[in-house]
Image (cartoon, coloured by chain):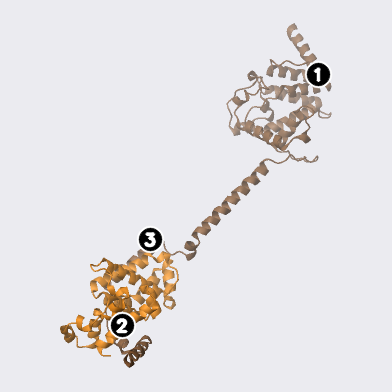
Amino acid sequence: MANHTHDDSEFDAYLHGQSPLSTLYQQTTTTGPATAIDTAILAAAQAAVKKRGGPASPFSYRWMVPTSLAAVIVLSVTVVLLSNHEQDVLLPLPAPAPATAKSEPPAEIMAEDLRAKQAPAGQPQEKATRKDAIKDADKLKTKRAEPVTTLQQQPAAPASALVAAAPESPEKIAEKPLAQGYATTSGSGALEKRQANMQEESSGSRVTESVKKLKMESKLSEATNLGAVVTKSAETWLNEITLLLKAGKETLARDELKAFRKTYASFTIDARVYPEVSKLNTLLEQEKHSE
Amino acid sequence: MLNELTDEQLMLRYRDGDSRAFELLYTRYKRPLYRYMQHQCGNAAIAEELFQDVWMNLIKARERYEVTASFKTFIYRMSHNRLIDHYRRQKHGIPTSYDDNEELQNSWSFADTITPEQTLAGQQQLARLLATLETLPEAQREAFLLKESTGLSVEQIAEITGVNSETAKSRLRYATYKLRKVLEL
């Protein structure tokens, strides 16, 4: 029993580092590992670090996955927000143009304005929905992009009336005068002539409605970059001739009608809709026959 | 600058790519770890092989290193595992002394294991100590070496060797008792 207690006290002393056994063991000398082993281990440690591409902050490892996820989320949200914003910018609601505004309105608004004027009665512009605005804008964009040949498929104008000209380079188009955008089978000279005549007749007096419209369309043509040859619709043209006749500008109206006839040779002028123009047309036909 | 850092800080720096931190860590641990291996194996060639393996494993595992325990415990735990793996591959497998059988622990007899020639040859106390150490059961020897080579506490020895504190204390008690008896201390 006493022996056991003695062992316990000795073991406790050993645990506290107060034992001759510990002192003796600490006197043992052992050589370290061979130098070759040292070199191999240190080289392996360096190679492992270099293989990974040099020192990196602990942040890069610990936060690699969360950072990647956060970046993906932020990018996705940004793209969605930007695409929504772009839609809003591309499809603005038609805003009323200020009366004193000197700058020209953008092509989209002009095209919309023109279409609204040409729309049949009972469909006022105020009632034009956002959908219509989208459609008009899309049509206008398509017109810009399409080559001339696609215009031949439009039912409003006869195929023979259109020029199947190859698309021209933007530089060449830019050099052209504005009115050339109304190229017809008779060439652009007719339109220039008409504009010149109209300007002559209206000089010193107030600008007529038809001239205003022509200018508007010229602007539209310019705005659409003249990427394709635009032909005025028969109805618009006849309305203009009617206005000229009502204004007493018979000479100008005759020239316009002749040009119209060349463009729309097969178009039948309804006497109930355009009585003045129909009369003038009959007169011109008679003169042609008599010649 | 680096000398002032703790083992754990050095290991973290090495994990993050500072190879100088590893060099310092290696300098601090190579001798005690090698001595532990050498005395535990009793064979210089095997000790060198195991020692190298431990450091290579540490290099491989550096990216996963987190400070969950002291670095000392971490590296000696790796060393212990490597030793057990070495024993497992031997013909006799893992030594029975690791079974924590009280009878097995008591069954050791100096007279049975140390030949008279060895005793006569090793007149000096140190030589006798090392010779006796080799005759101890592996688990007891390991407990003693971990205590003496590294200054680890009983709890840390238990943690490294994967046993409870009582078992670790018991192994250490038997080891010291036998050594003192042979060395007449």
**Where residue B94 sits in the image (x, y, percent)?**
28, 70
In this picture, residue A173 sits left or right of residue B11: right
Tell me if mark 1 has few (under 14), some (14-19) or many (20+) residues whose alpha carbon lies within 10 angstroms of its own.
some
Q: Quadrant of the N terminus of chain B?
A: bottom left
Q: Chain of mark 1?
A: A
In this picture, residue A89 sits left or right of residue B34: right
Look at mark 1 in the image and give the residue it sits on.
A250
Q: Chain of mark 3?
A: A
Tell me if mark 3 has few (under 14), some (14-19) or many (20+) residues whose alpha carbon lies within 10 angstroms of its own.
few
Look at mark 3 in the image and give the residue it sits on.
A51
**Where residue A268 sits in the image (x, y, percent)?**
73, 15
Tell me if mark 2 has few (under 14), some (14-19) or many (20+) residues whose alpha carbon lies within 10 angstroms of its own.
many
Q: Amino acid at mark 3?
A: Lys
**Mark sitting on residue B174:** 2
Chain B representation colour: orange
The residue lying toward the viewer, choosing from A220 and B167, is B167
For the point 73% across and 30% down, the residue is A115
Q: CA distance from mark 2 to mark 1?
A: 132 Å
Q: Chain of mark 2?
A: B
In this picture, residue B184 sits left or right of residue A270: left
The residue lying toward the viewer, choosing from B66 and A61, is B66
For the point 45% across and 64% down, the residue is A56
**Where residue A251 sits in the image (x, y, percent)?**
79, 18
**Where residue B130 sits in the image (x, y, percent)?**
24, 82
The quarter of the displayed image where residue B86 is located? bottom left
Q: Which chain is brown?
A: A
The quarter of the displayed image where residue B156 is located? bottom left
Tag in front: 2 or 1: 2
In the displayed image of the protein, which residue is found farthest to the top?
A: A290
Local SS, label 1: helix
- Residue A156 position (above or below residue A284): below
Say yes or no: labels 2 and 1 on the same chain.
Answer: no
